[in-house]
Structure formats: structure tokens, C-alpha cells
Amino acid sequence: MNVIWIVSDTVRRKDIGVYGNDKVRTPAIDALAAKSVRFDRYYGASFPTMPTRADYMTGKWTLSFMQWVPIPPGHVLLAELLRDNADVHTVGIVDTPFFIRDGMNYDRGFTTFVEIPDHYFVAKGGYNPPHSPYRKTLERRPKEPLDAECFAPKTFTKAMEWLTLNYKEDFFLYIDTWDPHEPWNAPLYYTEPYWPGYDGEQIMPFYKNWKEQPGFTEEMLKKAHAAYLGEISMVDAWIGNLLRQVEYMGLMENTAIIFTTDHGFYFGEHDIFGKMVFDNTQNLPEEVTRHPGAWARSPLYEEIAAIPLTIYVPGVKPGVYDGLASAVDMMPTILDLFGQEIPSYVEGKSLVPAVKDTKTPGREVVFTACPFINAGDTDQLVDHLLRRCVVPSMTTVTTDEWSFLHDCAPGGSELYNLKSDPDQLNNVIGQHPDIARDMHKYMVGFMRETNVPQRLQEPRLELKL
């Protein structure tokens, strides 16, 4: 058995054709899904980019013990287990620019590891300063790029080159592309179907309440979303190129193929343009506005937490699985596909039984959150800025019927009935306090089971209705 695992950053479930969007062009993903088991209740765990990948590599809820940092040496990663025990090539081909940068060590265990450079982080003249300012490097991307200048095309091209040379060997091929992460600047022909006459204008998200931004209009928000859909279609086109090569090589008979992402995005839902909030637009204390590098209240609704997942396994009947599943389940799933024993310390559960029988019960509850951090703590993220937490991050607790967002602030927690209110527009915590308390008990139990440090548990142990 071989496994190809494709992770495409920031893919909204609602913006994939097979998940019900009949306007977006994703024929390759849709065709793969038609041969696969599609997971309709799959949720991210640790949020955002690298915390999710830490979950993916360890099979653990890393939000409970680490921030956006290198994975501690004591944790054995998926690729290490496969390299040492499964007798397969472990290959990582990535353009998401944080796997090895600045001491990150997410490449552990890959016998072949390729990091694709891009205009994001390579300065003019080819010199890459060790702490290049994030926003300035974003500006170096061309306004009207060719396919060959974009993340996904380069990454999938390298993956296809590797397959050309090694397709007769047993392998685990991990492909990770940062597209469709912003800035959204795919070649114009990908975006024009969603915005006729598109001129390549890049509209960057500001991670705030879009309605409160002077001069920003709903038309601009829609244009940004169109550019995002263009990048989705670009990623899909290159997934299609890869899948055609896999078919030509006769690998569909002995290769499992997984497609997923790390988290979604808000294009105006809940008034947010971005994937979290960095300012005082959600009625936070004035202290936040005096410290622009501070975390603000960042609720993780379905648009962020509920993400796409399809798993193709040769010889397995395609279908739809509607049980709850979590990002921590991916690592044991891949071990299971290779016939490997799942270590006892892994907190995830293999999804192979669900793939083989879609009536297999799912999880009772799943959890999605930023890595736990308390008010006054600092953390370093993507742009190398130390940000101070003013309000502890919210935790989303999801069951088959309910979504509960725990807020340490009084009166800040929220409760939604996902069956009657899937868009989470009507907070019913006032009408159902007992259900909120039950959901909070799940969260407290989760923190204890995953050995969250007591100092991080304390502000989350109380439900302030």
C-alpha cells in the first residue's frame, strides 16, 4: 500500500463542489471524492496553520501543551514511525513556509524532504533575512503571476517529478501547499469565472470586523472571495494533474489518496474578514486597542472548524460518513493504512473503520481551539511578532447537534443548535443553560484527559453564563 496525503491550506468546506457549492470549479477534487469516502463532520483541532500540522504529525491534541513552536524532541512523528517500521520511502514536498524555518522541525522522519521557495519569503536578489517582515515579503509576489510562479503548481510539479522516478517503490508522499492562503493572486484566468474582467487586484484580509473598516465595501469583500475561489480552482487543477499521472502509472490500484486542509476562513460570516481577530471590534476592553499586537476574541465557528476530508482507499466502496472526526485522527489513520500498530500515546483514532463501513460510530465530541494561552502570556506567530494575550482564546466544543464556544469572559460563551441553525446565527445559550453546562463538562474532561497544565485549565474551569 502507498499513501498520498494532500494538505491544502485554508480550504473552506462550503467552497468545494462536492460539499454542495455548484458555482466553484473543483472538478478534480469532486472526481476524487466520487471515488472516496467523504467526511461531512470532520473538524480541525489545534488552530491555525502549524498547530494543525503538529496534530497531523503527532496524532495528539497539541493545543494542550505547545504553541506555534518546534515539536518537542520526545514526540515521535508519523514519518519517523513509517520510516522505521513500515519499510517505505517517506517523502515530504511542501511550500507551507514554516516546516523547517526558524528551527521548526516538522521534517523529522522524511527520508526525502523538499521545501519549495517562493516570493513570499525570498527577498529580491535571493537573500532571505532570518526574520524577514511578513507583510513586506507578501508584497513581493507578482500581481499577475504565471502558474509556474505560484505555490501549488511548483509543489505538485515536484511531487510528480518524484513519482516519475520512484513510482515503483513503496511510499508515503505528503504534499502540503499554502494555497489558497492569502494573498489570493492566482493567474487571472482562474479568477475571471468568478469575477468577469478581474484585474488582479489583491485585497488582503485585515482580521477584523469588515463592517467597521472605513472605505471597505461588501463589493470589495465579494471580490476578495472571488480571488480566493480562483486559487481554489488553481489548486484543484494541479491536483487533477497529479491524479492523472497517478492513473497513468497504474497506482490507483495500490495507493490511498487523502485530501484535506487545516482550517477555513471568514468572508464576512459573523462580520469577520480573516480567520481570527486582532483588534477591539468584538467589544473587548480598551486595553486591546492600546496594544495592537494583542490577541483579541477569536471565535472558531463552523466556517473555521468544519473542514473537508476525503479518503480514497483502493477496493473500498465510496460513500459519505457523517460521524464526528478530528484532525488528530489523521496520523493513526495513515499508520492503519500501512498496517502499522498505533502507539498507545496517540490520542487520535483511526478512521479506516469508518472508511470501510460508513455506519461506524463517530466521536461523541470534538474540540477546536487555538493553543491554550492565558491573559498576559505572549506567543510568537507567523510574522515573528510577539503578541500578548488579553483575553484567553475561545474553545469550540462540537457534538452531533450542538456547537458550544467557551469564553472565559462573563457572558461571552455561545451555544448553537447545528441542526436547526447550521449558520450559527442564533445564540441560544440563554434558553439552554443546562446544555451549555454539559458541553462545558466535556471541555473540562478533555483538559484533564490531555493533561493541560493546571495554570491553563484554571481560567477555563468556570462557565460564566
Image (spheres, rainbow, N blue to C red):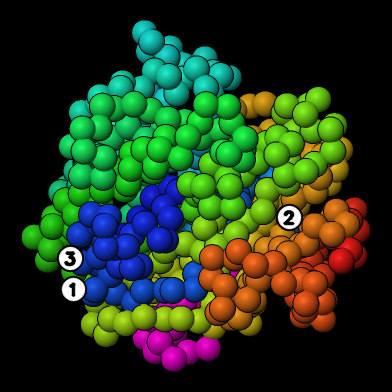
Q: Amino acid at mark 3?
A: Leu
* Residue pictured at 67% horizontal, 53% vertical: 299
Residue at the extreme left of the image, as rendered: 248
Residue at image location 46% in from the left, 20% down from the top: 137
The part of the image, by quadrant, that contains residue 448 is bottom right
The residue mark sitting in front, 2 or 1, is 2
Q: Are marks 3 and 1 in contact (CB under 8 Å)?
A: yes
Quadrant placement of the C terminus: bottom right
> On the image, numbered disc 2 is attached to which residue?
394
Q: Position of residue 210 (x, y in %)?
A: 56, 38
Residue at the spot of label 3: 251
- Where are the magenta residues, as a range? 342-361
- Which type of secondary structure does the marked residue at label 3 adopt? helix
Q: Position of residue 311 (x, y in %)?
A: 35, 71
Determine the main secondary structure of the stretch shown in magenta: loop
- Please tell me the numbered disc located at residue 253: 1
Q: Nearer the viewer, residue 301 or 388?
A: 301
| Residue 436 appears left or right of 242 | right
**x 44%, y 74%: residue:** 40
Height in image: 9 above or below 140?
Answer: below
Q: Position of residue 396 (x, y in %)?
A: 68, 63
